[in-house]
Image (cartoon, rainbow, N blue to C red):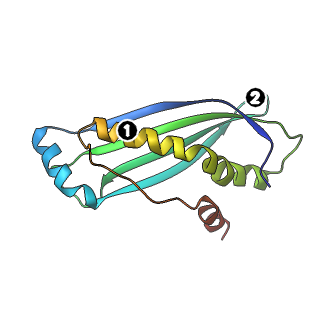
Amino acid sequence: MSIKHKIILKYIKDLSVEIPDAESLIVARDRISQYGLNLDISSKPLKNKMIEVFTKLTYADKEKSKRKAHFEMIYSTLVQIEEESPNKQQIKKFILCDLQEDIYPEIQEAFIQILKKSGFPEINISGKIDFLKLYQKTQN
């Protein structure tokens, strides 16, 4: 069961697109299938039962290559908890699983559009992330 909450705002907090030069773009286009997506989720408690949740996406070449591109986006979601006293475990599951299932499609779409506008018009990051499974891994 998810915690009763209200999303106050969502925005791209930080964005980094690093393509050193045209040759790097050409090489990166050829190697884009070797790139991997990493996801990192963190949060910061605020006043008035609010939490700022940071969903960080990094898309980078898995191998060390001099000619490469690097993409990173931190998406911030400000949430107000509307329940009286959820315990820490409920909050953790909410941040890592329930909230992500709600906001991730929008985050992924924004990230893909940035990649496309950065010189990778054919890019397609597909696949659904199983946030419940990721959350359960943190419990073991």
Residue lying at the far bottom of the rendered structure: 140
Q: Is residue 133 above or below residue 107?
A: below
Residue lying at the far right of the rendered structure: 84
- Number of residue marks: 2
Who's the residue at 51% across and 50% down the image?
40
> Which one is nearer the viewer's eye here, 54 or 125?
125
Residue identifier under label 2: 47
Classify mark 2: residues with Cα within 10 Å, few (<14), some (14-19) or many (20+): few
Who's the residue at 43% across and 54% down the image?
38
Who's the residue at 26% across and 43% down the image?
121
Kind of residue sitting beneath label 1: Gln
Residue identifier under label 1: 113
Per the model, the C-alpha gap separating discs 1 and 2 is: 34 Å
Determine the image quadrant of residue 62.
bottom left
Determine the image quadrant of residue 70.
top left
Looking at the image, residue 94 sits to the left or right of residue 43; the answer is right
Looking at the image, residue 57 sits to the left or right of residue 20; the answer is right
Residue 134: x percent and y percent?
Answer: 59, 63
Residue 117: x percent and y percent?
Answer: 29, 35
Kind of residue sitting beneath label 2: Lys
Instruction: Tell me the SS state at disc 1.
Output: helix
Who's the residue at 81% across and 42% down the image?
4
Residue 114: x percent and y percent?
Answer: 35, 37
Placement of the C terminus among the 4 image quadrants: bottom right
Dot 1 or dot 2: first in sequence order is 2
Residue lying at the far front of the rendered structure: 122
Q: Is residue 51 above or below residue 138?
A: above
